Amino acid sequence: VPIRSLADGKTRLAGYPGASVLTEAFARDVIAACMACPEIGHIALVSPDPRVLDLAFASGCIGIAESDSDSDSGGINGAISQARQELSDAENVVAILGDLPCIDGPSLSIVLRAAQEHETSFVPDTAGTGTTIWCSSNPSALSHFGHHSRAEHRADGAIELGVDQTSLQWARARRDVDTEIDLWDADRLGLGPATRAVVQPR
């Protein structure tokens, strides 16, 4: 789970009450989903932010201090590559962005069962241009998170998962949150407990 920072938060949610703690709440719900997914053996958070590493250790996860803290979108892919190198015994890897507050264990299980059929695969986001989850059993495969990552992953030969599925589980897996509209939609799908505790008191 690559997370750039807990302190900076989501810039497009800056005017939202409670925005300063939403990033951590999102991360906690992603961690909880990973812990509830029997297909996942180890959970690692990779970040240049010491607070993220503290969260990892407090949650019983592996914390990896990101060696390259570039702020552009390529930093996510560098963080994933670094984590794969440091976790050398992890053949099958799933990279999950930290802004999926309605993902849960059953949703992840459905994604990973579908991913087992392919060497490298990914889940596109709800908007249809980005990526929320990337899976690979190929140690040399590279992720392409960032602008137009759906097209980048497809061009690299990764198999797209869930686009023809209409179930709630797949909707949860595709719903990342960058704006208040995204957060409203995530709330409609069902937020994880950490994010719900921040949003519902409004």
Image (cartoon, rainbow, N blue to C red):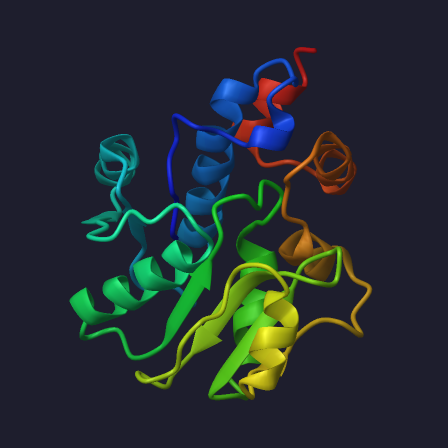
Out of 72 and 154, give the one closest to the viewer.
Answer: 72
How many tags in the picture?
Answer: 0
17 left or right, relative to 171: left
Query: In the rendered image, is residue 45 in sight?
Result: yes
- Left or right: where 57 falls relative to 116: left
Residue 90 found in image quarter: bottom left
Please tell me in which quadrant of the rendered image residue 52 appears: top left
Which is more toward the observer, 42 or 161?
A: 161
Judge from the rendering whether residue 190 lies leftward or rightward of residue 23; answer left or right.
right
Task: Work out whether 175 lies above or below 177.
Answer: below
Q: Residue visible at 26% across and 42% down?
A: 48
Rendered view: 165 above or below 192: below
Residue 132 position in % (x across, y down): 57, 58
- Asked whether residue 38 is in view, the answer is no
Residue beneath the point at 67% across and 57% down: 174
Which residue is depicted at the point 43% across and 53% down?
34
Quadrant location of the C terminus in the rendered image: top right
Query: On the rendered structure, is 126 left or right of 102?
Result: right
Q: Position of residue 7 (x, y in %)?
A: 39, 25
Q: In the image, residue 115 lies at what x, y percent? A: 54, 79
Percent of width and height locating residue 94: 42, 67
